[in-house]
Image (spheres, rainbow, N blue to C red):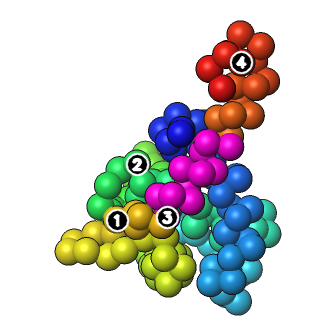
Amino acid sequence: MAKVYDVPANNMILRFADQLKKDKKIEAPNWSLFVKTGCHVEKIPQNKDWWYLRCASLLRKIYTHGPLGVSDLRREYGGKKQIGYSLGHHKRAGGAIIRRALQQLENGGYIVKKGKGRYISDEGMKRMDRVATEIYKEIVSSIPELKRYA
């Protein structure tokens, strides 16, 4: 059985975002159509399903990097803000988006809150590994030299 570490991140996030769209407990808030993801960006996200992509990305990041809090994730999703001609400085991402997404993922049973951070739950790990196994099998079957490993 393949793990999340074994497949490319973009394939994993896109595939798992499709599964999150079908989950009734994960739902984009009304304000998500009008909000920027942080003060370092100039426009709102162009993809209408960006909320599910962010949730899938948060899940993968928590899976791979262990217990993470909102502050850690704000730093990860932040970026450089250019002000005039001076050098750009790193700005953190918006905390409300990350906090709300983590709360929805907790209600969905994907992550659990223990101590000073959030961990991936056993059920969340099973679901992500199942998707990773499907992606891994597709990748291996598409390469003729690797068919014997499938």
Residue at position x 63%, y 50% from top?
A: 131
Q: Which one is in front in this view, the residue at disc 2 or the one at disc 4? A: 4
- Asked if the magenta segment contains residue 34, the reply would be no
The amino acid at mark 4 is Lys
Magenta-highlighted residues:
124-134
The residue carrying mark 3 is: 124
Which quadrant of the structure image shows residue 20? bottom right
Count of numbered circles in the view? 4
Q: Earlier in the sequence, mark 4 or mark 1?
A: 1
The residue that mark 1 highlights is 119
Q: Is the residue under label 3 in contact with that under label 4 (CB below 8 Å)?
A: no
- Say which of 33 and 122 sits in front: 122
* Mark 3 or mark 1: whose residue is earlier in sequence: 1
The x, y position of residue 60, in whole percent, is 50, 54
* Structural crowding at the residue carrying mark 4, measured as other residues with C-alpha within 10 Å and reported as few (<14), some (14–19) or many (≥20): few
Q: Amino acid at mark 2?
A: Thr
Q: Earlier along the polypeptide chain: callout 4 or callout 3? A: 3
Element assignment for label 1: strand
**Which residue carries the number 2 mark?**
64
Which of the 4 image quarters holds residue 33?
Answer: bottom right
Query: In the figure, is residue 101 to the left or right of 131?
Result: left
Q: Tell me, yes or no, whether the two marked residues, 3 and 1, touch with CB atoms within 8 Å.
A: no
Which of the numbered marks, if any, corresponds to residue 147?
Answer: 4
The amino acid sitting under disc 1 is Tyr
Q: Secondary structure at mark 2?
A: helix
What's the distance in space between the residues labelled 1 and 2, CA to CA?
10 Å
Q: Earlier in the sequence, mark 2 or mark 3?
A: 2
Badge 1 density bin: few <14, some 14–19, many ≥20, Cα 10 Å: many
Dot in front, 2 or 3: 3
Q: Quadrant of residue 46?
A: bottom right
